[in-house]
Image (cartoon, rainbow, N blue to C red):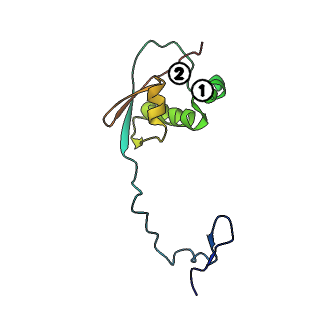
């Protein structure tokens, strides 16, 4: 009987083997949506702060906004410098709430330098 569930297992799991690579087409969940494309632009504001490559950015800003938000910020900064579009970062709203980026429809305004803390 295919798709046998072991109900006593926590969490319940299927005991069927996964299909061989390339034999089954993956269908996304109906609720899955691809993230929209955004265009990051560098905004020339006051240039006080850390360079995005500075180790202090990863060390101290990660403690405030989290490592995934810092990774998104570094990705946005790199894309803005290379003038290329990227998929909307997962933590974009958090970065905007902290004042690290500004969002205007499909544009994301990114500072060239990350502000000092304190």
Task: Determine contact: label 1, label 2, CB under 8 Å.
Answer: no
**Quarter-wise, where is residue 20 in the image?**
bottom right
Residue found at the far bottom of this picture: 1
**The C terminus - image quarter:** top right
Per the rendering, the mark at residue 114 is 2
Residue found at the far right of this picture: 9
Residue found at the far front of this picture: 8
Q: Residue 15 location in percent, x, y?
A: 64, 77
C-alpha distance separating marks 1 and 2: 13 Å
Which numbered disc, 1 or 2, marks the residue closer to the eye? 1
Per the rendering, the mark at residue 64 is 1
User: Which residue is pictured at 53% across the width and 33% down the height?
Assistant: 74
Vertical comparison of 47 with 69: above or below: above
Count of marks overlaid on the render? 2
Q: Residue 55 location in percent, x, y?
A: 65, 26
Secondary structure type for disc 2: loop
User: Is residue 33 toward the left or the right of residue 63 in the image?
Assistant: left
Q: Earlier in the sequence, mark 1 or mark 2?
A: 1
Q: Nearer the viewer, residue 84 or 37?
A: 37
Secondary structure type for disc 1: helix
Q: Mark 2, residues whose alpha carbon is within 10 Å: few (<14), some, or many (≥20)? A: many
Q: Residue 6 location in percent, x, y?
A: 65, 75
Vertical comparison of 26 with 36: above or below: below
User: Is residue 23 toward the left or the right of residue 107 in the image?
Assistant: right
Vertical comparison of 85 with 3: above or below: above
């Amino acid at each position: 009987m295919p798709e046998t569930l072991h109900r006593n297992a926590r969490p319940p799991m299927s005991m069927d083997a996964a299909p061989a690579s390339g034999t089954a087409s993956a269908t996304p969940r109906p609720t899955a949506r691809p993230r929209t494309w955004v265009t990051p632009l560098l905004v020339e504001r006051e240039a006080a702060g850390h360079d995005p490559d500075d180790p202090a950015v990863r060390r101290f800003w990660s403690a405030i906004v989290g490592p995934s938000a810092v990774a998104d910020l570094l990705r946005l900064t790199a894309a803005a410098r290379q003038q290329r579009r990227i998929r909307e970062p997962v933590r974009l709203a958090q970065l905007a709430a902290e004042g690290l980026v500004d969002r205007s429809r499909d544009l994301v305004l990114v500072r060239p330098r990350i502000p000092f803390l304190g």
